[in-house]
Image (cartoon, helix red, strand yellow):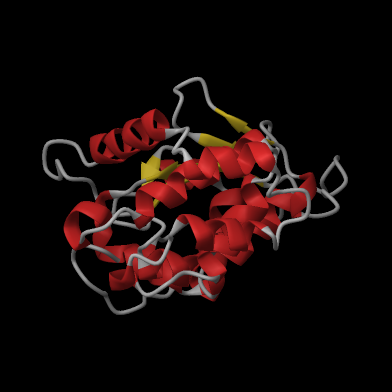
Amino acid sequence: MVRGGRVAVLCAAAVVVLAGCGQKAAQAKPAFESAEKLPENLAKDGTTILVGDPDARMTVHLYEDPRCPYCEEFETTGGSPTLRKMMLDHRAKGEYTMASFLDDRLGGGGSKRAVNALRAALEEGKFVEYHEVLFANQPEESSDGYTDAHLLELADQVRGLGGPEFTAAVKGMKYQSFVTASEKAYEKVGGTKEPEGPGTPTAVINDKRIPMKYNSLLLNGAAFESLLQQISDRPWDWVATSM
């Protein structure tokens, strides 16, 4: 994770102790057919991107920077595939706040360009698919490789994306104000103790943040799946757990 470095991966059972493990009742709603079918919208706050069934009982709010290699690890081989499966099954909904602080830290503008492009993809109803493609093809962190040309090339991998309006939005940084506001929203979640933000990726589940010292849990798919399943089964215990 950016800020603080790696922490040894912990088993979910060691991170939180949740009493019991009851079985959730069968879902009343059929699963979404594919990621393309997941609802996606911009929240009223103007920065949070909402994905999945708004009535799902569990909410996982993620803070990510497109250039962050740990975010790439979370999205490709870590906990994200499990979260996606739970969103498809209506068991969880996702919320995304896209940061861009690595541009200032490393130089360049790749994070800002990528966040702008993600907002443009949302306008086309293609945020979920494009978000996945961006992290699956993330350039080296130091290379500032999210150029306009690369972002448009990656858009070709998403069916129905890459038309004239999207292209113009990418090249003209149409959503610059969204990029700036999203970075400020990310920094705000760090509070007074972390005024520059909590680091990425950061996850807040049902309004309770996974502490930085346990953040490597996000990179362990099995451990993150176990944690989400326990929270899904007994959400009241998660709220009451002290970390």
Q: Give coordinates of residue 87: x percent, y percent.
A: 68, 49
User: Splitting the image into 4 quarters, where does residue 105 fall?
Assistant: bottom left
Towards the viewer: 218 or 118? 118
- In screen coordinates, is 203 left or right of 156? left
What is the total number of numbered labels drawn onto the structure image? 0
Q: Which residue sits at x=70%, y=63%?
A: 157
- The C terminus is located in which quarter? bottom left
Q: Give coordinates of residue 167: x percent, y percent.
A: 60, 44
Q: Which residue sits at x=43%, y=61%?
A: 146
Towards the viewer: 87 or 16? 87
Can residue 11 be seen from the camera position used here?
yes
Can residue 22 be seen from the camera position used here?
no
Q: Is residue 116 above or below residue 214?
A: above
Q: Give coordinates of residue 123: x percent, y percent.
A: 63, 34
Q: Residue furthest left?
A: 193
- In screen coordinates, is 243 left or right of 151? left
Towards the viewer: 197 or 22? 197
Q: Residue furthest bottom?
A: 8
- In screen coordinates, is 217 left or right of 60? left
Q: Give coordinates of residue 207: x percent, y percent.
A: 41, 37
Q: Which residue sits at x=71%, y=48%?
A: 161
User: Splitting the image into 4 quarters, where does residue 28 fall?
Assistant: top right
- In screen coordinates, is 157 left or right of 149? right
Q: Residue furthest top?
A: 44
- The N terminus is located in which quarter? bottom left
Q: Is residue 6 above or below residue 121?
A: below
Q: Is residue 40 above or below residue 233?
A: above
